[in-house]
Structures are given as structure tokens and as C-alpha cells.
Amino acid sequence: MNVLIIGSGGREHALAHSISKSPLLDQLVVSPGNPGIAEIARCVDCPDEPALFSLIEDACIDLVVIGPEAPLVDGLADR
């Protein structure tokens, strides 16, 4: 399974740490991530939604986890 986590804070780091231990995981990508997360996942900076959607398609992402509240409030989960 290929997983994308959106965010760069402690919550996302904890999620990345837990998800990285799954035997079902093939690839873990975090956008934008941070130096701590980069030790356990591939961090990719996506400056806008089209870049994010391209990443999802190019990396064959199966599951997206949105960490921060702001993208949820902005409706990212509905797109």
C-alpha cells in the first residue's frame, strides 16, 4: 500500500512513525514533511493542489491522510 500524509507537524510525524511500521506499507510519502519525518519517509513539497494531485497519481497513492485541520476545512478531502 502506498500512503501519503499531508502535513509537517508533530501529529504527522507520529502518524508517519506508526504507519511506517505496517507490514502492508510499500511506500510512505509526506508532503511537505520536515527533517524528522524525512528519516522515515520520502518528503515532497507540493506548492499547490495540482502538484499534490499529480503526486498522488504519479506515486500511485492508495491512501491519503490529512493531518492539519486547515486543509480539511478548505475541503481538500472532498476533491
Image (tube, grey):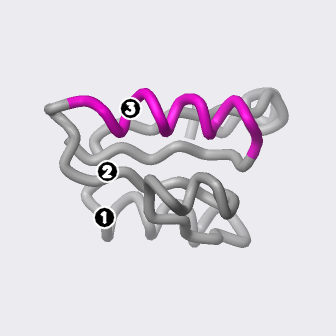
Q: Which residue is mark 1?
A: 59
Residue at 44%, 67% in the rendered image: 55
Residue placed under numbered mark 3 in the picture = 19
Identify the secondary structure beneath mark 3: helix
Residue at image point 58% right, 53% down: 37
Q: Kindly identify which residue carries mark 2.
A: 61
**Is disc 2 surrounded by few (<14), some (14 to 19) or many (20+) residues within 10 Å?**
some
- Principal SS element in the magenta part? helix
Amino acid type for the residue under numbered disc 3: Ile
Q: Is 40 situated left or right of 59 in this image?
A: right
**10 inside magenta stretch:** yes
Between 25 and 60, which is closer to the camera in this rendering? 25
- For label 1, the SS is loop
Q: Please state if 63 lies on the left or on the right of 12 as rendered.
A: left
Of residues 6 and 36, the one drawn nearer to the viewer in this rendering: 36
Left or right: 67 in relation to 54: right
Quarter of the figure with residue 38: bottom right
* Label 1 vs 3, first from the N-terminus: 3
The structure residue drawn at horizontal position 67% and vertical position 63%, both measured from the top left corner, is 35
Write down the region rendered in magenta. 9-22
**Looking at the picture, which amino acid does disc 1 mark?**
Ala
Find the distance from the CA under tag 2 to the CA under tag 1.
5 Å
Q: Residues within 10 Å of mark 3 (few under 14, many from 20)?
A: some
Any magenta on residue 40? no
